[in-house]
Image (cartoon, rainbow, N blue to C red):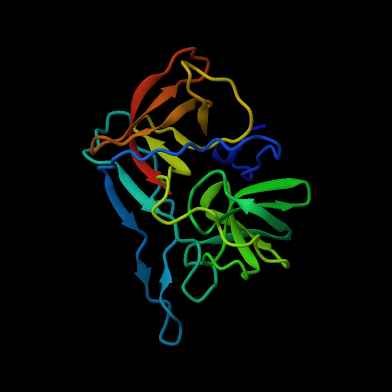
Amino acid sequence: MFAAAATGTWFALDPGHASARATHSPQPAAARSTLGATPAGTTSPPARSAVTESQTSTVAASSAPTQTQVITLSPWSPGGTPATGITITDRASGSCFGTAESTMRTDAWRCTAGDRILDPCFSPDSNPSDTSALCPDGALDRMVELSVPEGFPGNNNHMPGGPDIEPITLVLTNGARCSFAGGGTATLAGQRPNYGCDNGGYLYGYPNKTAAVWTISYAAPGSGASVSTPITTVYE
């Protein structure tokens, strides 16, 4: 079973599959940004804005971006509360047993709540003594707040400056919105379908980051072949 976050469900991954992430270091040339801080009031610290629908709207197929936009997700405010713009869709108690497979971020974990596996879940920072996490629930501005009474499993083994961080979600020029997919899957031309799209298509491999506009191998629904397709926006 692969993650179906693109269709509005939790990032639920098969607990027994091997990690789909590869270690490689391409040379990105896209425009990078972090969602900026916005004042939260005179007595509160600034809160980093979360992803909003206006920021993540799909792009018509006729659009031709000059540069892929890379946005770093910031689900927590500096004060340790959900960032401005984050909607908490549910609260649950669970545990985290390893580092995330969907991203190499040092604050991302692989967690459980009942019989569900949630990946990624973001802690307020990389401190293993934290006892809460935010896990995307379909859209990246909608999250489950997970209580982790036992804390996190030691230091995160995603090392700063290590393997390149690949996107959690991508938006293509054809309007498709695609999210990381875990679990055992078939390959196409030697590449694994690493992302499932909200239109039923798949993305194979990882983005080609050698130009200002990144591309990725996209297979339309029902197609037995893939084509290189430009990427407008990625969320890491």
Q: Residue furthest left?
A: 66
Q: Residue at x 39, y 43 (%)?
A: 234
Nearest to the observer: residue 72 or residue 206: 206
Residue 199 in sight here: no
Judge from the rendering whether residue 56 lies leftward or rightward of residue 124; answer left or right. Answer: left
Q: Furthest residue to the top?
A: 224
Q: Residue 27: where, in percent of width, then height?
A: 28, 40
Q: Image height check: is 9 above or below 94?
A: above
- Residue 220 lies, in percent from the top left, at 46, 20
Q: Residue at x 65, y 39 (%)?
A: 13
* Residue 127, position as x, y percentages in the image: 56, 68
Whether residue 65 sits left or right of residue 16 in the image: it is: left
Say if 47 sits above or below 233 in the image: below
Q: Quadrant of the N terminus?
A: top right
Q: Is residue 209 visible?
A: yes
Residue occupying image coordinates x 54% and y 67%: 124
Depth check, front residue: 26 or 65: 26
- Where is residue 215, by image quadrant? top left
> Which residue is at 30% across, 35% downward?
214
Question: Residue 75: percent from the left, percent from the top?
Answer: 50, 61
Q: How many marks?
A: 0
Q: Residue furthest right?
A: 114
- Horizontal relation, residue 35 to residue 20: left or right: left
Q: Quadrant of residue 157?
A: bottom right
